[in-house]
Amino acid sequence: MPTVEFNIGHKSYELACQEGEERLLRRAAAMLDTEARAILEQAGRMPEPRLLLLAGLMLADRMSATEDRAAAAERELNRLKANPPRIEVPVIPSGIAEAMAEIAARAEALADRAEEALES
């Protein structure tokens, strides 16, 4: 069983973990260390149990806020899946489409005449 060494605040730790979980343990320890160092910068030295408790509570608060945001995003996603936004595509009335086709035909005829005039 592998062991991982890490620091939290002002103390070193060594902890055994399952094979393949070393990276996860190091990441979790780094997150706890970041919170512990922020506490130590503000409050100075304190007993290890209190430091770990405060750092853990700060991480729990952050996780709670993240869970709230994820739940809100999931609700919004479910709402959008249930009621997809309507996309309206404008429809060109047939009269306008016919008029545009007639204008295009006239333009092509004028272009043909212009080419014939240039060739003559």
Image: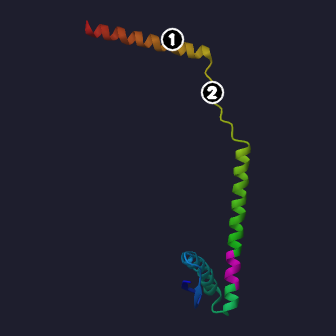
x and y percent of residue 91 in the render?
A: 63, 24
Query: Residue extending furthest top?
Result: 120
Task: Write the start and end of the magenta stretch as one range.
Answer: 53-59
Q: Secondary structure at mark 2?
A: loop
Q: Is residue 57 magenta?
A: yes
- The amino acid on which the numbered mark 2 sits, given as a three-letter code, is Pro
Q: Quadrant of residue 67?
A: bottom right
Q: How many other residues sit within 10 Å of disc 2, few (<14), some (14-19) or many (≥20)?
A: few
Residue 36 in magenta? no
Q: Residue at x 49, y 13 (%)?
A: 103
Q: What secondary structure is marked by label 1?
A: helix
Residue visible at 59% across and 86% down? Answer: 15
Any part of residue 8 in sight: no
Give the vertical position of 47 relative to 112 (above or below).
below
Image coordinates for residue 39, horizontal then vertical, percent? 64, 84
User: Which residue, given by chain and number where applicable, does mark 2 sit on?
Assistant: 90
Mark 2 or mark 1, earlier in chain? 2
Location of residue 10 (image quadrant): bottom right
Q: Residue 41 in the image: x percent, y percent?
A: 60, 85
Label 2 – label 1 distance at C-alpha: 21 Å
For disc 1, the marked residue is 102
Q: Is 34 above or below relative to 49?
A: above
Q: Quadrant of the N terminus?
A: bottom right
Q: Is residue 45 left or right of residue 110?
A: right
Residue 29 is left or right of residue 49, and the answer is left
Residue 4: x, y in percent?
Answer: 54, 84
Judging from the image, the colouring scheme is rainbow
Q: Quadrant of the C terminus?
A: top left
Q: Quadrant of residue 59?
A: bottom right
Looking at the rendered structure, the kind of residue marked 1 is Glu
Q: How many residues crowd mark 1 within 10 Å: few (<14), some (14–19), many (20+)?
A: few
Nearer the observer, 37 or 31 = 31
